[in-house]
Image (tube, grey):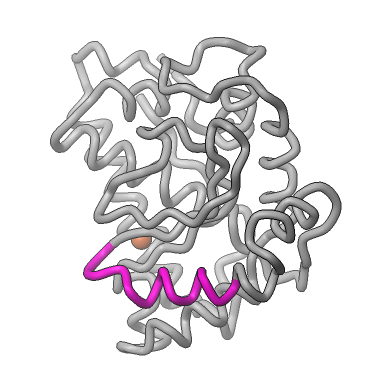
């Protein structure tokens, strides 16, 4: 059974960027529905006693879609903050090295989010060999399936922005950029800043830095039965 992780901020903390009304739908209805549906689907199956990351790696169809959406949304909420933060330290150095500048990353991010057709996600990820790249995934797809380490993610499904921005996805992306939780991204980066290959194996090694990120994220998602 998977427990839905609580929001890391108050329901109105992100206003006016994201309204409390959007949170009421996005977290309390959409995200909650994915978790409830997943638990319904895995009840009595081999997935029932597995961690969320293991379910994502080992499933397909409806179980994959719902488990990936639970993880993707949890990562999205952790990617956001009402504090005005900026990247620093090793992560900022790496961004400057791989993208040229923070401004260049922002431009690429806005372009990626604007050009993603339909529903999906835009991620800043770390490749196994260390390079930072932007990755678009469609529908429920997640970089966890490709051995990529996510640092932040933007939800570009319409339910993420339509109440507050209607069809103006670029405006939502601009505001998202101003609310990125760079402390979270920096922590995720530093925990995986080594040469250990981040593979797609089941997350059961406490020395695997990727597992550490998942463990931190999934305090509420641990197997409870
Ligand atoms: Fe969403």
Point 40% across, 28% down: residue: 52
Point 61% across, 32% down: residue: 213
Q: Which residues are magenta?
A: 106-119
Image quadrant for the N terminus?
top left
Which of 5/217 is in front? 217
Q: Relative to 218, does residue 81 appear above or below in the rendering?
A: below
Which of 162/130 is in front? 130
Q: Position of residue 86 (x, y in %)?
A: 78, 66
Q: Residue furthest left?
A: 61
Side of 6 relative to 9 (left or right): left
Point 43% across, 60% down: residue: 122
Q: Relative to 70, does residue 44 appear above or below in the rendering?
A: above
Q: Relative to 138, does residue 24 appear above or below in the rendering?
A: below
Q: Position of residue 143 (x, y in %)?
A: 41, 41
Point 51% across, 71% down: residue: 108
Which of 138/52 is in front? 138
């Amino acid at each position: 059974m998977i427990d839905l992780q609580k929001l890391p901020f108050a329901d109105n903390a992100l206003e006016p960027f994201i309204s409390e009304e959007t949170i009421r739908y996005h977290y309390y209805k959409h995200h909650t529905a994915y978790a409830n549906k997943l638990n319904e689907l895995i009840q009595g199956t081999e997935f029932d006693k597995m961690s969320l990351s293991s379910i994502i790696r080992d499933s397909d169809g409806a179980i994959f879609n719902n488990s990936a959406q639970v993880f993707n949304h949890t990562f999205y909420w952790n990617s956001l903050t009402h504090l005005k933060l900026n990247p620093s330290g090793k992560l900022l150095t790496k961004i400057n090295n791989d993208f040229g500048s923070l401004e260049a990353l922002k431009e690429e991010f806005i372009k990626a989010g604007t050009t993603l057709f339909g529903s999906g996600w835009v991620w800043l990820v770390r490749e196994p060999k260390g390079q930072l790249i932007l990755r678009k995934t469609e529908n429920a797809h997640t970089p966890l399936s490709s051995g990529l380490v996510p640092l932040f993610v933007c939800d570009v499904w319409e339910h993420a922005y339509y109440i507050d921005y209607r069809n103006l996805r670029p405006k939502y992306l601009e505001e998202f950029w101003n609310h990125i939780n760079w402390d979270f991204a920096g922590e995720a980066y530093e925990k995986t800043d080594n040469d250990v290959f981040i593979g797609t194996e089941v997350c059961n090694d406490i020395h695997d830095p990727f597992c550490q990120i998942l463990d931190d994220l999934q305090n509420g998602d641990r197997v409870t039965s």
